[in-house]
Image (cartoon, rainbow, N blue to C red):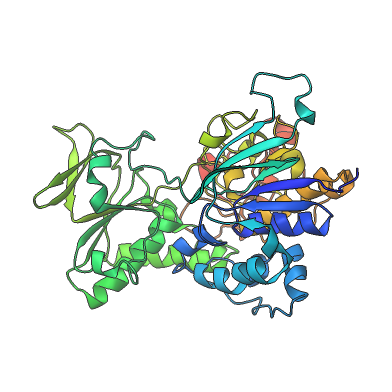
Amino acid sequence: MSTQSKTVAIIGAGPVGLAAAAHALERGLTPVVVEAGAEAGHAVRQWSHVRMFSPWEYNIDRAAERLLTAVGWNSPDPQQYPTGGELAERYLTPLAERTALKDHIRTTSRVTAISRVGFDKMKTKGREHAPFELRYQNGAGQGTLRADFVIDASGSWSSPNPAGADGLTAIGETEAQTRIAYAMPDVLGRARARYAGRKVAVLGSGHSAVGTLIDLVRLKQDEPATEAIWLVRGDRPEKAFGGGANDKLAARGELGARLAQLVADGAITVQSEFPVTHIALRENGLRIGAGSACCGRSVIVDELIVATGFRPDLSFLREMRLALDPALESAQALGPMIDPNEHSCGTVRPHGARELAQPEPGFYIAGMKSYGRAPTFLMLTGYEQVRSIVADIIGDRAGAERVELVLPETGVCSLSPAAGEASACCGGPAKADVSACCAADETARATTGSGCGCASSGKAA
């Protein structure tokens, strides 16, 4: 296939979007990156205070590194762990502003819709030959962009899940926005004045919730009146402690172990089995209720931090033909590999264009958005995704299918660590079966026709 004048529109100038552009440029395509924020890495900068679980060696795309090396960039120490701010300033900013990508990025341009020129969603004949049309909004008004291919790497940071346990906003949540923050606010830095000396509830059991709770305890050391209350929807808060020393991402394991110790020491008040249903502003603070408004449990706090994960923004894809997992809203083929309802191990086999291609020819969803609502995405996985996608676009089928990534064994079962559990949970990742969560599950399916059940037992196989 001739790549001459072929244009790839890439939505999002985050790590995966810029990596996609680097691979596209290297393979003779013309990338156009459309970014809603004022600069590359806009979403990453929102969590600039957070230290990543993986070191630099797992956070730099190889095609991007080649572009940077050509302009004299000095790579950070591969064994050091960057913060989000360091990732943006030392990697994303020079990649976007100093390399050949600088002329291919449009910032402050939010994509509002995508379609095929002359084709609505229902029209089929000849559809695959029509170029894509992207509409975007910026300070000058509405703009349009045409492209031969589209890679949606817009992530999900701008679409946090609400507080309501049923997936909807809790009753009163919208009206109480002045006392609610989402994801992981910088409680020790930019948002310190908001939380110092206050009673703060943190809802969620993922890593954002864990990190925020730990930071609130640190804040209490300087501001003794600060109180941290952990609201957990389920009945087993210990699931958030992770695998401890069994986690091959050591920084992540240490975070869970630290939380476990703080809970044991009484530094954090735990309210388990607390599915939030109602939120109301009161003179004495914010009333958060679980159960019926009249008879359920409730806590009164000054502030609420909702750290319940993210969901993909699909609103601008209404005219695209999509195949999504019905539960996760991930790329359909990824659903069985990452669904936390089915298994508890976090390692996902490297995957690419085959799993990420949509029924809309030439359209791909990559990066965190490809995982939908699942929380297990690793940046290095996204880099492998876009390498494979670009190979697929130019007709390099062998390159698209080839696996060029060896992930660390990050899978740990969702229980507190116990003596005697194997360090490589469930035998490590599956080797071939994309629907298997781990090697043990893959073997069990092949020999007995059913999985190993590690999700239900919580034990390493």
- Residue 45's x, y, as percent? 48, 64
The residue sitting at 61% across, 54% down in the picture is: 425
Q: Quadrant of the N terminus?
A: top right
Q: Nearer the viewer, residue 79 or 88?
A: 88
- Residue 166's x, y, as percent? 36, 33
The residue sitting at 26% across, 66% down in the picture is: 267
Q: Is residue 383 above or below residue 50?
A: above
Q: Nearer the viewer, residue 433 or 155?
A: 155
Q: Is residue 7 above or below residue 122?
A: below
The residue sitting at 28% across, 43% down in the picture is: 274
- Residue 226's x, y, as percent? 21, 67
Residue at the left extreme, as displayed: 283
Q: Is residue 164 left or right of residue 10?
A: left
Q: Is residue 123 above or below residue 380?
A: above
Residue at the right extreme, as displayed: 1
Q: Nearer the viewer, residue 192 or 381?
A: 192
**In the picture, residue 229 is in which quadrant?**
bottom left
Q: Is residue 355 above or below residue 128?
A: below
Residue at the front extreme, as displayed: 140
**In the picture, residue 93 is in which quadrant?**
bottom right
Residue 19 at least partly seen: yes
- Residue 316's x, y, as percent? 54, 36
